[in-house]
Image (cartoon, rainbow, N blue to C red):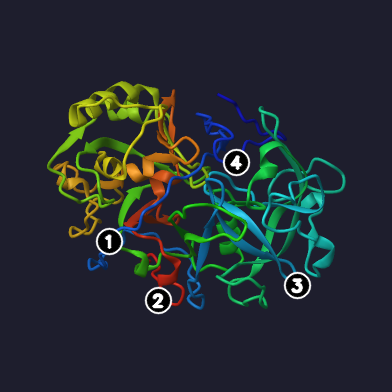
């Protein structure tokens, strides 16, 4: 397994996309891990069931962040790349569009700039960012670096290298930015949500980073340089939260199709098919972390819904301390799901018991559509947030199969999310792997079909099942975490 290294006195996670079937997804097991990506599998629209929160939170249980009530939450459309989701970012004055992968596993936003040498212009959606054409562009002097300490006498140099041969070099700069809407042309900077962003202006790219569909990357982890954090500090978002809702189109291309929604500052209720439930997220820096209490297989497959008839369920026999040895990371830039190697044998045993067949990890299989939909749904029981907080009417609670776990939640992963179809081979491949020694990653195929709220102020992650259709939320009221 390739190891990805980050130099210049700091370690950072970074995720990037690659072409279908061109490479295997690799994962580093420690906090310094960097992760390559494989293609996501199609998300199939589920029956919509609209529910709304009707339970007040316990008094004094939620953090009291700074809130700018003059700001409105504005959902922005996501698009799909080669296994990743990206968003339009308008940069400069006048504005230039740059497409960036949305990555909760890293903290730097970086794009190819005008002096970038052989940086994949023939693969990317947009041309390089022309900093000389922006009236608001600024280089960051060596004594004012945010992303990394100064390494030269003239600027804040950022250099990222990868053991398999890829690398990029950038220097820290700043410019006015705002998130795009579903339009093809720029508009004047909205006064409420544009802000000055520190980002990496790339001058050199090598290897697979050149061939992704998106131009660059948007770091969304818990670091001070992340996009959401800079937006908050600069009063461009009402609080320290954002939500991601991933769907999937049948193919990726430079024209791009809507494949979900990102909302800065909260979550949009119109996206929700179920009441939002909350998992504990204890980290204050680095990456977003969850704790897996149990994993189940539910026979019958079919729909995403976590609450669907959980009578024929088989619990995977593994101790939760073993399951969580090393942190479990929730990473939007990782397209597959990777868990401990010690889970392989008990998972296979539970699979055999509930299906009568052997689990075929890393092997291709012929499946009809009916057979795919009949495969078991994987149910992840995550440690809940704030005892007694969950809405007892919510459908995503673990009590339906774990009666003594009323505060824990269930996140469902149907076969349409963990199996991927290869058109060239006309077979399906599993995209959940049991090969890690310590820790693991719940990637975008785990996240799909949910509107997921990353609520930093309250150290929690909310899950509501959703079809993630941008057309339903383009001009509707939005929901902010209660304060």
x and y percentages locating residue 400 in the rendered image: 15, 47
Q: What residue sits right under mark 3 in the picture?
A: 94
Quadrant, the N terminus: top right
* Mark 3 residue element: loop
Q: CA distance from mark 4 to mark 2?
A: 36 Å
Q: What residue sits right under mark 1 in the picture?
A: 47
Q: Nearer the viewer, residue 476 or 326?
A: 476
* Upstream in sequence: badge 4 or badge 3: 4
Q: Is residue 257 visible?
A: yes
Check disc 2: other Cα within 10 Å, few if <14, some if 14-19, many if 20+.
Answer: few
Check disc 3: other Cα within 10 Å, few if <14, some if 14-19, many if 20+.
Answer: some
457 above or below 409?
below
Residue at position x 32%, y 57% from top? 465
- Image quadrant assignment for residue 445: top left
Q: CA distance from mark 4 to mark 1?
A: 32 Å
Q: CA distance from mark 3 to mark 1?
A: 43 Å
Mark 3 or 1: the one toward you: 1
* Upstream in sequence: badge 4 or badge 1: 4
Check disc 4: other Cα within 10 Å, few if <14, some if 14-19, many if 20+.
Answer: many
Residue at position x 75%, y 72% from top? 94
Mark 4 or 2: the one toward you: 4
Q: What residue sits right under mark 4 in the picture?
A: 18
Q: Is residue 281 visible?
A: no
User: Is residue 387 toward the left or the right of residue 171 in the image?
Assistant: left
* Mark 1 residue element: loop
Q: What residue sits right under mark 2 in the picture?
A: 477
Q: CA distance from mark 2 to mark 3?
A: 30 Å
* Upstream in sequence: badge 1 or badge 2: 1
Check disc 1: other Cα within 10 Å, few if <14, some if 14-19, many if 20+.
Answer: few
Q: Nearer the viewer, residue 138 or 349?
A: 349
């Amino acid at each position: 397994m390739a190891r990805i290294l980050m130099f210049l006195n700091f370690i950072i996670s970074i995720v990037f996309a690659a072409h279908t079937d061109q490479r295997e997804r690799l994962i580093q097991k420690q906090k310094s891990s960097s992760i390559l990506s494989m293609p996501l599998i199609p998300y199939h629209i589920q029956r919509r069931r609209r529910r709304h929160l009707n339970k007040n939170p316990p008094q004094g249980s939620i953090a009291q962040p700074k809130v700018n009530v003059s700001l409105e939450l504005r959902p922005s459309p996501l698009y799909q790349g080669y296994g990743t989701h990206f968003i339009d970012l308008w940069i400069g004055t006048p504005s230039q569009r740059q497409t960036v992968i949305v990555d909760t596993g890293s903290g730097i936003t970086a794009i190819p700039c005008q002096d970038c040498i052989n940086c994949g212009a023939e693969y990317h959606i947009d041309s390089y960012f022309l900093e000389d054409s922006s009236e608001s562009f600024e280089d960051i002097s060596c004594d004012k670096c945010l992303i990394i300490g100064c390494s030269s006498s003239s600027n804040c140099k950022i250099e990222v290298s990868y053991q398999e041969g890829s690398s990029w070099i950038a220097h820290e700069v700043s410019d006015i930015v705002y998130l795009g809407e579903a339009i093809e042309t720029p508009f004047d900077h909205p006064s409420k949500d544009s802000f000055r962003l520190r980002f990496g202006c790339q001058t050199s790219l090598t290897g697979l980073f050149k061939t992704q569909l998106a131009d660059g990357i948007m770091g969304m982890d818990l670091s001070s340089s992340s996009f959401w954090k800079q937006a908050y500090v600069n009063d461009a978002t009402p609080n320290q939260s954002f939500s991601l809702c991933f769907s999937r189109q049948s193919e990726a291309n430079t024209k791009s199709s809507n494949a979900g929604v990102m909302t800065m500052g909260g979550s949009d209720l119109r996206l929700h098919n179920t009441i939002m439930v909350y998992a504990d997220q204890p980290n204050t820096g680095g990456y977003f972390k969850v704790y897996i209490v149990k994993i189940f297989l539910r026979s019958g497959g079919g729909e995403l819904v976590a609450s669907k008839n959980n009578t024929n369920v088989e619990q995977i026999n593994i101790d939760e301390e073993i399951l969580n040895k090393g942190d479990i990371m929730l990473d939007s830039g990782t397209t597959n799901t990777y868990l401990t190697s010690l889970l392989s044998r008990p998972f296979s045993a539970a699979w055999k018991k509930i299906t009568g067949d052997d689990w075929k990890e890393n092997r291709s299989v012929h499946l009809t559509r009916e057979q795919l939909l009949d495969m078991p749904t994987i149910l992840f029981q995550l440690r809940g947030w704030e005892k007694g907080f969950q809405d007892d009417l919510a459908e995503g609670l673990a009590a339906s199969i774990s009666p003594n776990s009323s505060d824990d939640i269930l996140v469902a992963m149907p076969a349409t999310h963990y199996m991927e179809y290869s058109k060239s081979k006309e077979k399906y491949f599993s995209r959940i792997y049991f090969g890690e020694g310590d820790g693991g990653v719940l990637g975008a195929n785990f996240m799909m079909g949910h509107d997921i709220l990353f609520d930093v102020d309250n150290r929690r992650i909310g899950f509501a099942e959703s079809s993630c259709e941008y057309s339903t939320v383009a001009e509707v009221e939005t929901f902010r975490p209660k304060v």
